[in-house]
Amino acid sequence: MSNSRESESGRYLPEYHHSQILLSISLEGAERTRDIEDHLGCSNKTALNKLHELHNANVLTATKWGTAYRWQLNTNQPTPPDSPTDLTGLQLPQLLTQVIEQLTEHYLTHYKPLTLTDNVSDWLDKRVNTDRVNPGHYATNSALFNRFLKATLYALYQPEANSLEALSPGADWNSQFEAAANITDNHAFTSSIDTHLPEHPQPIDSLLLALRHLVVQTTNPSEVLADVYEQLISQAARRDLGQFATPNHVSQFMASWAITDPDDTILDPGIGAGQLAYQALRCKMDQGCQTPMPDITGIDVDEIAITMAATALKLADGPGSPNLYQDDFIHFSPVYSGTQSQFKAYDVIIGNPPYSRHQAVDNQSKNNLNTIISEETGQNFSRRTPLYGYFLIHAAQFLREGGRAAFIMPSQFMATDFGIDMKSYLLEHFTIHAIIQLDDSVDIFDGVKTTPSILLLEAGTPTDTHEISFLKLSYWPTDIPVATLLDQPSQRDSHQAVAFHATVAQQVLTTTERWTHYFHETDIQDHPELVEFDTLATVKRGIATGNNSFFCLSQADIDAHNIPPEYRERILKTARGLDKLNITTEDWKQWRDNGDDVWMLYCYDDDGNIQQSDDIESQAVKDYLNHGRKTGVTEGTLVSRRNPWYRVDRRDPPDILGKYMNRNGFQFYRNDADLLTTNNTHTIYLNDEDTLNVFLAYLNSNFIRGILSKRSRNYSGLQKLEISDLEAAPVLDVASIPQSLKSHLSTLFNDLCDARRDPNADDTQILQQIDEAIEAHLEFDAS
């Protein structure tokens, strides 16, 4: 019979597992093949196969003993191989996990247990809710794992620090680690939970030393150590610290995008097991950096994370030490870190912030966070901001102008009220290159139900023409770099991994709209409460004169040429810079008095018929038309095709005016002044004028804003909305909605108009109320 059994963690050990062999040999000091057969209850062939696999991995040594072999743990100095070693058969993360688990159970059973002193209790309280775990088991498990990591890191430093004596089983490792900390300046060696172990049994130390040979041979140490940590520490316990490891392929992409120079200095503010920092180090080496290690700075509240990261980074590169600090990153602040000389601006920041929700942060801590972030930024943030939001904004304080940042974090901030403040900060302080959202089915963080997004940012104000790529991936592609999907439309448009892509001018985005709209086709197109725009209204382009300088006139022009009232109409020549949402006669008079072109030459009679030149009674108008002929107006392409040439389109004043091209999002205006307009503005005629305010509330909502932005075309930073795009847009069927909703939206639009006319008013809350009313009626989940 085998010794397969269930461990303390609840995981079953498979039959004849390597961990059982290692534990047996560590306890006996040395064993023959037959002893292993008897211990496992397996065949000689099975035992030999397992033993040879461990021997080939340098974990065991073999000594000829008569006709048999005697197997011992290899506690000698580990040496990284010149070429990768195939450790597939050992299932390395599972092997390391199971050995640590078995050592923990053996320690708790046979040796003096770790005492829950005040220091140990404080350590536990900062890491985990002790009601969910066995405190003694959790602390011992963590201590043995960290002791193993330090022993591995120590061995990696020995070739460059000759004064470091080799570790031996049962020796005073704590003193040796303290010496290593002083010599190497690596904070991973500082005092931590492992120093509280009351005993250091020789069998356990021997096995920890032997396990080092496995780690130094892996090609992805950060990923292996992260896997071991996630198996040793339950998800519930890791959630208390917001710890979820970044997969290797995601880390590689983020680092390769952010690092553009081999001399870039890098900050990883939540370094964890070092997956991002490890890929950053490799990226710098690939770009030709000879001594990349000192350019890496990592911070983490968890000392075990610091030791994992230090070990992974040391395996990636030889000489030197990274700058690692075990502390709460929020306290590394330009404001709170002490003297200004302690502050350093980095070229690159890469991060996977803690995923703790705002409810997981106690009130005092949240007040401290708000105080620190508000003083650093001069901006207030919602108290519902989750820890990852504070983390990102705080990290931004350490990025130099023009530096790059890549963060992976939950997508919720893009579609929630607390995200308004975060989006405001991002829009103001960053050029947002791309936001990549991963489909819910993509299991980026094992067992974590969240929709992650990757933000690619550059510190500094964006240009007027800058566009953001919103990329939705149904899976992470392995046949093509994600960077290629961002940069090459031909590859992106044809690749199956791309679920959706939209390009939006950054100036168009607002803080109150749900940015999640940009990751998918409008999923409300077939909603029963929505209809196409052209079923409720007729859209036309404004009047194309063919020569605005001739046909559009100021009051001074009217007076100079003595054009009588019956040959002119009031107009809005351009809506550029217009922020008001209701255009009144008083507005028109102000433009007139400012000298703007507010009139259009309009030679129609009372019946709407164009007046031929012989029928025009005003000599002043005839003289002005002759002036046009003499100055070449009739030679224009559009003008020359008309009969008579001064015949502009006849129009009735529209109910609504809408910008045709703009940089800051589409706006629609109530035409209270009954103005005509030129062809740089859309004119909209409602089928039911009684729904005017309700329709305008919808058209100016953030709900439709994202939809129109996706339908528009971008020309050097200008968003252009064609008539056909507007006609097909899904709009609220304002004629059929309940009267109570009509009244509510109508009132909100009037409030919005008033707010736009008050320089001290903020319309954010009004827009939110409009969005909420629309979404509640449609039962639409904006997230």
Image (spheres, rainbow, N blue to C red):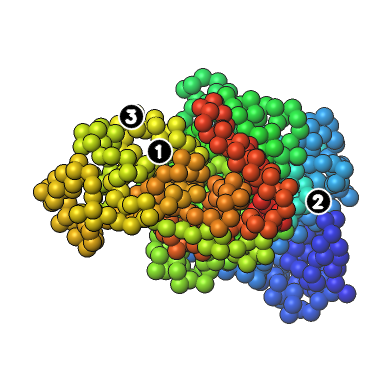
Q: Nearer the viewer, mark 2 or mark 3?
A: 3
User: Which residue corresponds to the image point at 53% horizontal and 28% vertical from the top-left?
Assistant: 758
Residue for badge 2: 104
Q: Residue furthest top?
A: 339
Along the viewing direction, whichever of 374 and 406 lies nearer the viewer: 374
The N terminus lies in quadrant? bottom right
Instruction: Measuring from the top left, give residue 243's x and y in whole percent.
Output: 68, 47
Q: In terms of sequence position, does the residue under pointer 1 or pointer 2 come before the other?
A: 2
**Crowd band around label 2 with a 10 angstrom C-alpha radius: few (<14), some (14–19), many (20+):** many
Q: Is residue 443 visible?
A: no
Q: In terms of sequence position, does the residue under pointer 3 or pointer 1 come before the other?
A: 1
Instruction: Measuring from the top left, give residue 726's x and y in whole percent.
Output: 48, 59
- Circle 2 SS class: helix
User: Which residue corresponds to the image point at 32% horizontal and 44% vertical from the top-left?
Assistant: 566
**Crowd band around label 3 with a 10 angstrom C-alpha radius: few (<14), some (14–19), many (20+):** few
The label number, if any, that marks residue 577 in the structure image: 1
- Circle 3 SS class: loop
User: Which residue corresponds to the image point at 77% horizontal and 52% vertical from the top-left?
Assistant: 234
Task: Classify residue 3 as left or right of residue 421.
Answer: right
Along the viewing direction, whichever of 669 and 382 lies nearer the viewer: 669
> Are dots 1 and 2 in contact, CB under 8 Å?
no
User: Which residue corresponds to the image point at 22% horizontal and 59% vertical from the top-left?
Assistant: 644
Instruction: Measuring from the top left, give residue 591's x and y in whole percent.
Output: 37, 33
Specify the amino acid type for callout 1.
Gly
Residue for badge 3: 594
Specify the amino acid type for callout 2.
Thr
